[in-house]
């Protein structure tokens, strides 16, 4: 991880190691995959690394990354505050310089239409321009000190346009089925753009009209109950959800238990909810089978203590982690002082799934 050579040295460190980031002065800082940096206990990893260049007047900082979620992508923020350079090639027909854009790709002929003359030229003709050295960076804000550069896979010598078209069509089919993951990968990694799920529901009344009335506490179809608990400084917010086949779900009860989480009475009231029997119309009942309690915030110890005393009842602490590509159930970790199973959740994945399921209009799976 540290190599010396005549005239200098190179050190490789992980973004999750604050001690390594702060260990030595550096003149040239190369940061890769910024959007996938994990939070550290000593502050922002990029800021820690930047501070190591402060002693050099001729320092150079290069930050690169595949973008992730729109509005949360750090490389997007840096790029928007830069000169915003875009890679351009001249049209093989009219020689007008222009960016390579996915929206102008013609699938049937695997070609791209010129912005100016309107002619379609195949991939090989566009890339011949690049091989001949005719490509150039065009900056929207050339006067800005920080230089930014954006390039997508249409310019890549290792990626064929036909491969991109095939990948897009597969991702499009999955998106129609309510699975956005492959389309997000396509947008992030091949188009080098941030992912934004706009959704189709523009009016909350559309959602309100889809509410169902149950003829009992539990509607038919519910096979199991779970409870999720969010901890706040002055209350616990909980929701009980009923689950059926193929992940069909019903909201059973959402409520607030007022009281500080360091007060045992607050948790006793949660137990009353967690241990109660919820009834079907025929009188049969279910209790909550599994409970997940948010361990973030200012009452982590109280959450661990509550869950630790109720593990036999399947009460587990959870913690959300942001970041693209993290699965909803990311992993189970016992790396805490109580040695309890902590379930780490990829919250971006979960939110994306919920947004996509708003497209499902009919009750069922």
Image (cartoon, grey):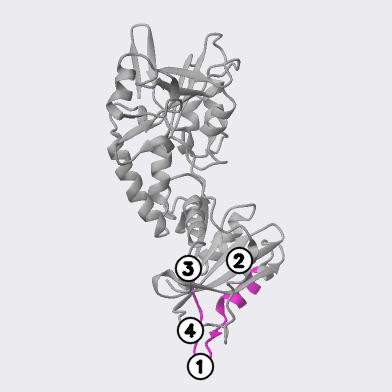
Q: Earlier in the sequence, mark 3 or mark 2?
A: 2
Q: Regarding mark 4 in the picture, which secondary structure is present there? A: loop
Measured Cα–Cα span from mark 4 to mark 3: 29 Å
In the rendered structure, find residue 311 and report the number of the disc placed on it: 3
Whether 164 is drawn above or below 341: the answer is above
Residue at image mark 1: 282
Tag in front: 3 or 2? 2
- Residues at marks 4 and 2 touching, judged by CB atoms closer than 8 Å: no
Whether 31 is drawn above or below 303: the answer is above
Residue 31 place in picture, x, y as percent: 45, 26
Residue 118 place in picture, x, y as percent: 41, 29
Q: Earlier in the sequence, mark 1 or mark 2?
A: 2
In the rendered structure, find residue 206 and report the number of the disc placed on it: 2
Name the foreground residue: 165 vs 326: 165
Q: Earlier in the sequence, mark 4 or mark 2?
A: 2
- Compared across the picture, whether 91 is left or right of 148 comes to left
Q: Is residue 289 magenta?
A: yes
Measured Cα–Cα span from mark 1 to mark 3: 31 Å
Measured Cα–Cα span from mark 4 to mark 2: 24 Å
Q: Regarding mark 1 in the picture, which secondary structure is present there? A: loop
Q: Is residue 186 magenta?
A: no
Tag in front: 4 or 3? 4
- Residues at marks 3 and 2 touching, judged by CB atoms closer than 8 Å: no
The residue positioned 37% from the left and 28% from the top of the image is 119
Residue at image mark 4: 220
In the rendered structure, find residue 172 and report the number of the disc placed on it: none
Name the foreground residue: 325 vs 114: 114
| Range of residues picked out in magenta | 267-290
Task: Say whether residue 333 is visible.
Answer: no
- Residues at marks 1 and 2 touching, judged by CB atoms closer than 8 Å: no
Q: Earlier in the sequence, mark 4 or mark 3?
A: 4
Rendered-image quadrant of the C terminus: bottom left
């Amino acid at each position: 991880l540290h190599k010396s050579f005549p005239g200098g040295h190179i050190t490789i460190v992980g973004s999750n190691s604050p001690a390594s980031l702060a260990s030595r002065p550096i003149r040239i800082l190369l940061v890769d995959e910024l959007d996938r940096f994990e939070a550290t206990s000593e502050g922002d990893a990029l800021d820690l690394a930047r501070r190591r260049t402060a002693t050099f007047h001729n320092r150079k900082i290069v930050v690169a990354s595949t973008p992730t979620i729109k509005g949360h992508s750090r490389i997007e923020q840096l790029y928007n505050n830069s000169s915003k350079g875009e890679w351009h090639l001249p049209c093989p027909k009219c020689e007008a310089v222009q960016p390579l854009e996915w929206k102008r790709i013609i699938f049937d002929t695997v070609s791209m239409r010129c912005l100016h003359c309107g002619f379609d030229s195949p991939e090989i003709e566009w890339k011949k321009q690049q091989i001949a050295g005719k490509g150039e960076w065009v900056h929207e804000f050339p006067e800005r000190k920080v230089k930014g550069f954006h390039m997508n896979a249409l310019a890549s010598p290792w990626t064929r346009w036909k491969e991109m078209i095939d990948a897009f069509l597969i991702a499009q089919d999955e998106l129609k089925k309510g699975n956005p993951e492959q389309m997000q990968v396509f947008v992030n990694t091949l188009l080098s753009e941030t992912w934004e799920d706009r959704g189709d529901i523009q009016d909350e009344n559309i959602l309100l009209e889809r509410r169902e009335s149950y003829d009992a506490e539990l509607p038919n179809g519910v096979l199991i109950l779970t409870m999720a608990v969010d901890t706040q400084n002055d209350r616990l917010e909980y929701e009980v959800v009923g689950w059926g086949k193929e992940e069909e779900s019903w909201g059973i009860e959402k409520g607030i238990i007022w009281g500080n989480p360091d007060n045992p009475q607050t948790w006793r009231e949660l137990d009353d909810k967690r241990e109660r029997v919820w009834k079907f119309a025929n009188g049969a009942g279910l209790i909550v089978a599994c409970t997940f309690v948010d361990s973030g915030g200012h009452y982590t110890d109280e959450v661990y203590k509550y869950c630790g005393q109720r593990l036999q009842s399947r009460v587990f602490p959870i913690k959300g982690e942001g970041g693209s590509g993290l699965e909803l159930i990311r992993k189970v970790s016992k790396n805490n002082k109580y040695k309890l199973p902590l379930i780490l959740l990829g919250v971006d994945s979960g939110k994306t799934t919920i947004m996509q399921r708003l497209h499902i209009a009919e009750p069922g799976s």
